[in-house]
Amino acid sequence: MNHTLRITIRQIEGAIIRIIGLVERRGFSIKSVNATPSTCGQEMAMVIEVESERSAETLVRQVEKLFDVRAVSLQIAGGQKGLLQERVTC
Amino acid sequence: MNGAEFLARALERQGVDTIFGYPGGTIMPFYDALVDSSIRHILVRHEQAAALAADGYARATGKVGVCVSTSGPGATNLVTGIANAFLDSIPLVAITGQVPTPVMGTDAFQEVDIFGLTMPVVKHSFLVRRVEDLAQVVRDAFEVATQGRPGPVLIDLPKDVAQAVLDASPLLPGPRAPQPQPDAEEIEAACDLIAAAQRPVLYAGGGIGMAGAIEEFRHLAAASGIPVVCTLKGLGAVPTGEQRYLGMLGMHGNRAANNAVQEADLLICIGARFDDRATGKLDEFAPRAKVIHMDADASEIGKRRFADVALLGGLAPTLQALADHCQENPLDIGAWQQLCASEKQEFAWRYDAPGDGIYAPAMLRDLSAAAGDDTIITCDVGQHQMWVAQHCSFADPSRHLSSGGLGTMGFGIPSAIGAQLGNPDKRVITVTGDGSIMMNIQEFATIKRYELPVKIVLLDNQCLGMVRQWQELFFKGRYSGIDLSDNPDFTEVARSFGIPAFRVEHQQEVAAAITRLLDTDGPVLAHVVIDPQANVWPLVPPGQSNSTMIEESRT
C-alpha cells in the first residue's frame, strides 16, 4: 500500500535523517522524498511517499513523537507518482 | 564560565547528584569542571558499565540516570547501554565529548559520529555546535528523557564548545507538561467492556511503575477482582503473593497466567506493548479477547494488536476512574476467578527436583524469601534471568531490575552498582551467570572502590545455558559455541578485586550460604555450582502460541 506523509519539521541538524531513518527502520520503503525550507528558515516541509503492508497510522504516530516534528498528515496516495512539493509559510 | 562548567551547573540545577563515567581527551573540560561541582562522579572501568549503571540507578530511584564518556571509543562503548535504556523506556541522559567543531568530519583522532550512530536508539539527541544553545539543550534533554514514555537522550559536546566562554545561567527544569487526560467517552466505553466481560484479565506492564501508578493499579485490581498477569517489566505491579496474581505471561511465563490470557474475553493491557516474548504467536494470542489498551505512548496503540478501546495519557487517573467504576459496580466474575485460582494452584511452581545438586529455582525462591520482597534484585540475561522472574518476590517493579527489551548480558553488575548508589540503605542483590558476569566483570573494581555492599549470586552451569537449552530443543542437540567450562575460578577473581567470595556446591549448603551472603557486611560473591543440563521450564517454543507450553519431562 502506498501512502504519502506530509511532515513539518524543525530545520535543525539531523532532523531529516532522523525521520528517514525511522521510516525505513519501521518497515516502510521510501519511494520519494522532498524537503523544502520554510520562508522563515525555521522549519521544513517534508513529503515522503512510502510503501508497506504495515499500518501507516502507526508510522504517523511514531513520527509524531519525534522532538523535531511539528505536524504530520497522512494521505493514501494510491497511484500518485512523482515528487510532491510543498512550501511552509511562517 | 566555559561550556563545560555551565554543563556541570546545569546538571546540578536539574537535580543530578550522581553521574557514571570514564574520562578521555575530548571530555576533559567537563572532568575539569567536575572538580568544583557538587556532583558525585562514579568512575567505572568500561563505558558500557557507565550507561548500564546509570540505567540501573534510574530504574531503582525513578530519577534520570546520567552517564558521560569521551568521544570515539568511549562514545561507542556507551551505545549498548543507551540501546538498553531505549528498549526498556528508561530515562537516561548520555553526555559524550566530541572532537572540536573545526575538525569534525575530518576523521580526527577519536572522532566518531555518535549523533548518527545512536539515532535509532535514542528518544532524541543533541549535537551542541554553539555554546549559547547549552542551556536550552540541557533543559530539553531532561524533559524529553522523562516526559510521556521515558527514554534515553544523547548530548554530544564538541571540545571547543565545552571550552568556549559563556555568560548565562542554567535554566530551571520547566514545568511538567500536563499528561493528556483520558477521554471521558473512552473511559465509559472501557467500563462497558469491563461490565460485559465474563473472563477479564489485567495485563500489567512496566509502564505502570514508571507512570507512578502502582497504587491506582492496585486499587483497580482490588476493586474489580480481575486476575492479574505481569510482563517481565511489570513484575511487582501487584505484590508477588497477591491472591489474584497469576504470574508472568509469555515464553517463560506461568501456565496459569498464559492460560488465563488465552481464555480471556477481555484483555486490559496497561503500560505494556504486546512484545513478542509476551505474546508468542501473535495471531493466536488471546484469540477471543477484546482489548482495552492504556499507554502513555500513542504509537503503541494498534502497533501489534488492535485495541477496541484506547486510553491514552497518564495511567494513574485512568486507572483510578476504572477502579472507582468497579467499586460502584461490582463485577460478577466469581466462576472465572475460581477457575483462575484453581489453575494457579494446579500449575504452581514445583521445587521437588531430584538429586543432590543445587536446584537454582529453589535457591532463588529461598534467597528472595530470606531477603524480603523490598530487596532490589538485579540480574543478567539468560536462564538465571528467567528463574529470577519466576521465583523471586517483588514488592514493587523498582525492586526487579532486568534487561527486558534488549536482553543485555552484562547488565547485572553495573545495574546493581547504580541501584545501590541510588539506594544506599537498601539491600541489593545481583543474580548473574557464568556467561553474563564476564561481560562486565571489570566492575568488581567499582564495587570495591566505593565499598558497595552488593551481594553477587553467580549461578555457574559452565555454559551459556539459554543458548544450550535452545540448541538442545530446537537445533537437534548440536551444541555450538556454548562451552564455558574453562572459566577462571570466580572466587579467586573476586578475591583478587578485594571482594570476599565462597563456593556452594551441594543442596545441603544452600541455607547456610544464603545466611552468609545476607549477613556479610559489604560486597560478597557466592559462586553457586548448578547442573549444566538444567533448563528453564515451562517454555513456549519460538513462534508458537502461548497455549503450547512445553514442560520438563519428569522420568
Image (spheres, coloured by chain):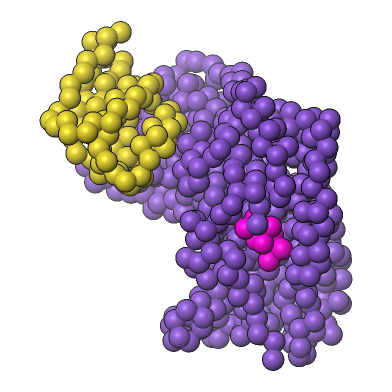
Residue B33 in the figure: left or right of residue B555: left
Residue B358 in the figure: left or right of residue B252: right
Residue A60 in the figure: left or right of residue B314: left
The spot of residue B247 in percent (x, y) is 72, 59
* A8 lies above or below B534: above
Which region is colored magenta? Answer: B254-262
The spot of residue B303 in percent (x, y) is 46, 43
Q: Quadrant of the C terminus of chain B?
A: bottom right
**What residue sits 27% from the left and 34% below the top?**
A3
Q: Can residue B193 be seen here?
A: yes
Q: Colour of chain A?
A: yellow
Residue B356 in the figure: left or right of residue B384: right
Type of secondary structure dominating the magenta stretch: helix
**What residue sits 61% from the left and 84% below the top?**
B532
**What residue sits 17% from the left and 30% below the top?**
A80
Using the image as rendered, state which of residue B420 and residue B27 is in the foreground.
B420
Q: Colour of chain B?
A: purple
**What residue sits 70% from the left and 43% below the top?**
B197
